Image (cartoon, grey):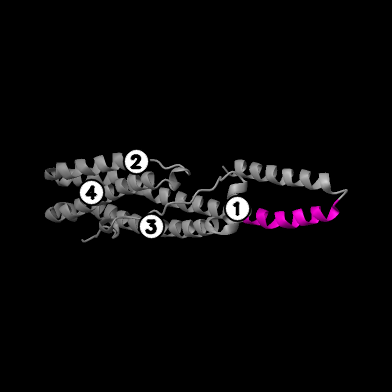
Amino acid sequence: MLRAMNTTLRGVVARVALVAASVAPAVPVALVVTSAAALPGCQKYDQLIEADATADQKWANVEAQLQRRYDLVPNLVATVKASAKHEETTLTKVMEARAAATQIKLSADDLSDPAKVAAFQKAQDQLKGSLSRLLVAQEAYPELKASAGFRDLQTQLEGTENRILRAREEYNAAVKTFNAELGKVGGQVVNKVTGKPFKARVYFTASTEAQAAPKVSF
């Protein structure tokens, strides 16, 4: 994506240079004016590229933490299943929610689509909700509560949820910066001249019920 944008910018600059060169012998002042006018546009383009790349990096951090959650689920389910055989329905729902969440992948373009981002968020919220219900269910099983392996998985899950929250906040801050630059007059002009390669990003939020990390009680 960045390579394509840089190619577009070089094409714009090249066209400006050719036009300026054709009139330089007769009107040398025009070249100076054109060059001076092009510099702010190039700087604004670079700012948009940098802000977009930062948002991509922050989103990658969100995905890394979500993957950490996905990886914890099978071990957690297996540990609970060994001691809480009556929670088969709850365990099944957890695995189904995990499967649904892992099936939804967002590309860079998808992050500008409110509907796709909303579907992704819904799947994540459903997985988190099913995990929270599983942690509540463990209260009825003293043997499970006493398991060192289960306590370790609980602690890892709580830590992961906190990291997801921080990563989401950092991503949203990067989105705010990018969208602000894109929304400015200079950003809109540069985006139009370069073929509108930039699109405003959608914030990654969570439902009210999914805001708090799962509670861990020993």
Where residue 27 appears, as percent x and y from the top left, is: 85, 52
User: What residue type is disc 4 on?
Assistant: Ser
The residue singled out by tag 3 in the image is 163
What's the magenta region? 27-44
Bin the neighbour count of mark 2 within 10 Å (Cα to Cα): few under 14, some 14-19, many 20 and up.
some
Question: Of 8 and 21, which appears nearest the observer?
Answer: 21
The residue singled out by tag 4 in the image is 130
The answer to whether marks 3 and 1 mark residues whose Cβ atoms lie closer than 8 Å is no
Q: Is residue 150 left or right of residue 49?
A: left
The answer to whether marks 3 and 2 mark residues whose Cβ atoms lie closer than 8 Å is no
What separation in Å lies between label 4 and label 3 (alpha carbons)? 19 Å
Name the element at disc 2.
Answer: helix
Bin the neighbour count of mark 4 within 10 Å (Cα to Cα): few under 14, some 14-19, many 20 and up.
many
Q: In which quarter of the image is residue 96?
A: top left
The disc, 2 or 1, on the residue closer to the chain's N-terminal end is: 2
Image quadrant in which the N terminus is located? top right
The disc, 3 or 1, on the residue closer to the chain's N-terminal end is: 3
Q: Determine the main secondary structure of the stretch shown in magenta.
A: helix
Which of pointers 3 and 2 indicates the residue nearer the eye?
2
Name the element at disc 3.
Answer: helix
Disc sitting over residue 200 in the figure: none
The residue singled out by tag 2 in the image is 102
Where residue 107 appears, as percent x and y from the top left, is: 45, 42
Image quadrant in which the C terminus is located? bottom left
Q: Is residue 37 left or right of residue 89?
A: right
User: What residue type is disc 2 on?
Assistant: Thr
- Seen as rendered, the residue at the extreme front is 26
Name the element at disc 1.
Answer: helix
The residue singled out by tag 1 in the image is 189
Where residue 28 appears, as percent x and y from the top left, is: 85, 53
The disc, 2 or 4, on the residue closer to the chain's N-terminal end is: 2
What separation in Å lies between label 2 and label 4 (alpha carbons)? 15 Å
